[in-house]
């Protein structure tokens, strides 16, 4: 009995040692969003303070934060949707026809720093008069979402027995019909995983929006700059804006958590 309690105690200690450093920045940001500027910059840090909603009021009343939220939603949903239309057939082709070179090429495109694409994108969109447009942001975000979807789903499709498609094709279905009617329903957890992860990466992207967007298509990560000036930084509003930006991604992850875990697990095991 004593040994069991010791093991449980050690487990709790190790768990806290891992979780606390990971959660501390978020908890500090959340607490700071309810502090005044004086409380935020106070030293030593004030752990006991009177909460205030003034920071959130400045974010949603003084700034056009709802517009930025709509922009991020349009760009993220469109980029993920178009990437699904292109990525699912590509991932299926890679998995079934063993196109390893194409898979490696897509992985390299994902691993390349996004800043290397900025100059070509800027020249192309400026020549086409597409700067500060949804088209420019959606296409640039597809550089993030499409490789993620293809890489995750190609591994997941490889874990689905090919006999399922062959049975449908023996019954008269074409390969395209077998893909739509048999493979995609089975691959539901993998699709949810790919959609969730790619949308979060698109939602949090800063670099493409910083260069390719202006006031019309400004996204949430760029909107934080509204609270940074040459003279000072409104830390309370910055923290409140950061919490507001992170909230949808956290909620999305919590809602689809079991599907994400299942999709990553099944996609990692072939056969």
Image (cartoon, rainbow, N blue to C red):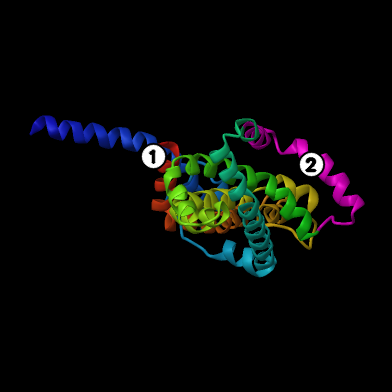
Residue 175, x across and y down, in percent: 55, 51
Image: 124 above or below 113: below
- Residue 136 visible in the displayed image: yes
Choose between 152 and 135: the one closer to the eye. 152
Total numbered labels placed on residues in the image: 2
Q: Can residue 116 be found in the magenta stretch?
A: yes
Which residue is more in the foreground, 79 or 6? 79
Q: Residue at x 62, y 60 (%)?
A: 77
| Other residues around mark 2 within 10 Å, as few (<14) / some (14–19) / many (≥20) | some
**Residue tagged 1:** 19
Residue at the image point whose x is 43% and y is 53% from the top = 186
Magenta-drawn segment:
104-132
Q: Position of residue 42 (x, y in %)?
A: 54, 46
Which residue is at 53% across, 42% downward?
Answer: 152
Query: Which x, y percent locates residue 49?
Result: 45, 55
Q: Is residue 99 above or below residue 161?
A: above
Q: Is residue 39 left or right of residue 130?
A: left
Answer few, some or many: residues within 10 Å of disc 1's Cα (few below 14, many 20 plus, some between 14 and 19).
few
């Amino acid at each position: 009995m004593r040994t069991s309690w010791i093991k449980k105690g050690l487990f709790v200690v190790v768990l806290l040692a891992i979780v606390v450093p990971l959660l501390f920045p978020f908890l500090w940001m959340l607490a700071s969003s309810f502090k005044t500027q004086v409380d935020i910059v106070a030293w030593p840090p004030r752990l006991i303070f009177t909460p205030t909603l003034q920071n959130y009021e400045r974010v949603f009343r003084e700034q056009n934060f709802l517009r930025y939220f709509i922009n991020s939603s349009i760009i993220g949903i469109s980029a993920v949707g178009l990437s699904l239309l292109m990525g699912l057939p590509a991932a299926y082709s890679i998995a079934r026809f063993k196109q390893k070179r194409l898979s490696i090429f897509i992985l390299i495109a994902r691993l390349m720093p996004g800043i290397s694409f900025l100059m070509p994108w800027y020249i192309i969109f400026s020549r086409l008069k597409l700067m500060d447009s949804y088209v420019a942001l959606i296409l640039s975000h597809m550089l993030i979402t499409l490789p993620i979807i293809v890489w995750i789903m190609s591994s997941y499709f490889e874990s689905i027995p090919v006999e399922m498609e062959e049975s449908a094709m023996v019954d008269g279905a074409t390969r395209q019909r077998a893909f739509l009617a048999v493979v995609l329903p089975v691959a539901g957890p993998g699709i949810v995983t790919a959609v969730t992860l790619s949308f979060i990466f698109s939602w949090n992207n800063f670099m493409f929006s910083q260069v390719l967007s202006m006031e019309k298509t400004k996204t949430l990560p760029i909107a934080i700059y509204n609270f940074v000036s040459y003279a000072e930084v409104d830390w309370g509003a910055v923290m409140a804006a950061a919490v507001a930006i992170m909230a949808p991604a956290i909620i999305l992850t919590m809602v689809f958590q079991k599907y994400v875990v299942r999709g990553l697990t099944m996609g990692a095991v072939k056969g």
